Amino acid sequence: MTAGKLDPITLTVIQSGLQQVCNEMDLAFVRSAFSPVISEALDRSDGIYHKDNGELIAQGELGLPVFVGTMQFGTRCVIERAKDLKEGDVYIVNDPYLGGTHLMDVRFVKPFFYEGELFAWLANTGHWPDTGGSVPGGFSANATEVEQEGLRLPPVKLYKAGVMDEEILSIVLSNIRIADQRIGDIKAQAAALSSGQKRFTELIDRYGKQTVNSSIQELRSRAAQQMRAKIKEIPDGLYQGEAFVDSDGVIDEPLCIDMKVRKQDTELYFDMSGSSPPCLGPMNSVIATTKSSVYLAIKHIFPDVPINAGTFDPLHIKEPEGTFLYAKYPRPVSGCAAEVSQRIAEAVFSALVQAIPQQLFAAPAGTSGNLCVGGYDPIRERNYVMYVISGGGYGGNAATDGLSNGCSTIGISKTTPVEVMEQFYPVLFEEYSLHEGSGGAGKSRGGFGVNYKIKLRRGNAKVSMVMDHGRFGPQGVLGGKDGGVNKVQIEHNGHSYIPPHLSKDQNIHVQAGDTICVSTPGGGGYESALQRIPELVRKDVQRGYYTIRQAQDLFGVVLTSDGVVDDNATKKLRGH
C-alpha cells in the first residue's frame, strides 16, 4: 500500500500505535529501574528510529524533550559504527561527542528486525546516578577535561544475540560508584527495549510492513508540513536574543549565547556563532545537545505539532564552531544537557518573543538544580549517591501568571518525592516551601521557585552541584522584571558556606547534622509590572508571595497596613 492510498483512520491508528510502543517502553523502564532518578524523577526516554539514518520516528510521551534530538544523533553514530548485526544485540554508549549529552546519560541502542530484516532501531537513555569521575554523581563543577567527569563508552555491544557480555559489564562496573546497584538499571533499560520489540512486532503483524513503512513516511511529511504552517505565521525578519550562563565553574565570568533567528517564508535559520568561545569548565555543549535545545525550544512554542524527524526539517542550525556550544574532545560537558541547553532555549524565546509576543512567555527558571550527595551510610553499611532535581518558576505570558515549581525547560523530570529520598538515603528534608518573592514582576508575574533544606542524618558525605541562574535571574520580557536567582548555602559544623560561583561547586565535605539549603529561581515577568491589576497584587501579598514593601517597589501598588489597596496612592505612584 502506498502513502497516497492510506486512509486517515489507518494512518491515525498506526500513529497512535507507534506512540503506544514507545509509551510501553517508558513504563517498563520506569517500573523496573532501581535508581529513583529514573523510577521517580523520570530522567530517561525511549524511542523508535529509522534503520538507515537514525531519524526519529516516535518517542514516548514520558520522555525528556531534550533527548528528542540527541537520541537520533546518537543512534546515527551507532549505525555508522555497527557491524555484524544480530537479533538481540544491544549497544551501550554514553560518549557525549557521539550524539550525546553528558556521561551520566547512558544510551542503549538495539536493532529491530522483522522477518529477518532490519526494520528500525529502538533506543533509550537513562540518567545513571554515577558513571565514575572525580565526584559522586558526575557533576564535577571544576572539571577541565571529560575524563574527570566519568567513564566514557563508545558504542559497544553489551548484549550479543541476547546474551550480556560479562567482560564489558565488568569494565563498566569497575569504573563507577555503587556498582552493585547499577545492574538493576541496566536490566531495566534492556527490558524496556525488549518490551518495545514485542509491541512493535505486533503492530507490524497486524498492519503489514508496507503499510507501517508508508505510514511512517506520511507522518514524517505531515509533521514537516504542520511545522512549516506554524512558522509561516511568524513575520519575516531577523530577530536577536541572548542568554547568559553564570560561569563555567572554573573561571568566574559569564558565558554569552548570542542567538540570531532569521525567519523566511516557512523556514527558520539559527545562528549562534557570536557566542562565547569554548570554556575551561564543564559548561561546554556538544553539538547534538545544542541542536536538540533549539528543537525543544520551537516545540515549546508550537506544542501541538507531532514529534518526529519531519518536525525539525524547517529548522536550519548553523553549527557554531569555535564557541562553547560546539564542544570537542576533551572539553568537559557535564553541564550541557541540564543547564546550557536551557540557556539556548531561553535565547530562542528571547529572540522570537519580539515577533510573536502573544505566543511566547518570559523565561522559565531554566535550571535542573543538579545536586549530588554521595557518602557512606553506616547503618545500612553501603555507599550511596543521592541525586536531586528541583523545579522552579515558569515565566508569565500574555494570558496568565507563570506556574510555580514547574519542571525544567528540557524535560518532564520531576523532583523525587522527599519521602522516597528519605527512605533510600540518610537524609531528612527539614523544609520544602515556595521561594516567595522569586517570581519576576510583570503584568503577568513569573511563577515561584522552591526552597528546600536537607539535613544529613548520619555518616559523612560530599556535596556537589552544577546549577545556574545564580547570578542572572530568568529574563523578563516586554518590560517585565527578571525572576529571582538560584541560591545555595551549606551549614557545616556551625559555619555557613556559599559557593564562590554561587551555584556550582564540588566535593564539599559535610557530616551528620550539617544542612544543605537551596532556593531555586522564579520565572521572569511579562510586560510592565505597573500594568498589573492592583487586586492581583493584593492577593499575592495576602498569600505571602510578596511583602507590602515589594508590592510598592515592584508593582507600584500601595497597600494599607491591613492589606487594602490605597487607590489614590497607587495611581499617584504609577504616574496616573
Image (tube, rainbow, N blue to C red):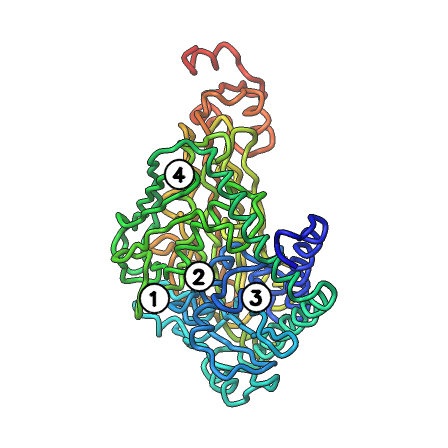
In the foreground, 427 or 404: 404
- Sequence-wise, the earlier of marks 1 and 3 is 1
Disc on the earlier residue, 2 or 4: 4
Task: Assess whether mark 4 and mark 1 are in contact (beta carbons under 8 angstroms).
Answer: no
CA gap, disc 3 and disc 2? 13 Å
188 with respect to 264 (left or right)? right
Badge 1 amino acid:
Pro
Distance from Cα at disc 2 to Cα at disc 1: 29 Å
Asked if disc 2 and disc 1 are in contact, CB closer than 8 Å, the reply is: no
Question: Mark number for residue 492?
Answer: 2
Q: Quadrant of residue 62?
A: bottom right
Kind of residue indicated by mark 3 = Arg
Name the residue tied to disc 1: 332
Mark 1 residue crowding within 10 angstroms, few (<14) / some (14–19) / many (20+):
many
The first of marks 2 and 1 along the sequence is 1
Q: Is residue 315 visible?
A: yes
Instruction: Kindly identify which residue carries mark 4.
Output: 350
Circle 4 or circle 3, nearest the eye: 4
Alpha carbon distance from label 2 to label 4: 39 Å
Residue 441 visible in this rendered orientation of the protein: no
At a point 58% along the width and 64% down the height, the residue shown is 48
Name the element at disc 3.
loop
Question: How packed is label 2: few (under 14 Cα within 10 Å), some, or many (20 or more)?
Answer: some
CA separation, marks 1 and 4? 27 Å
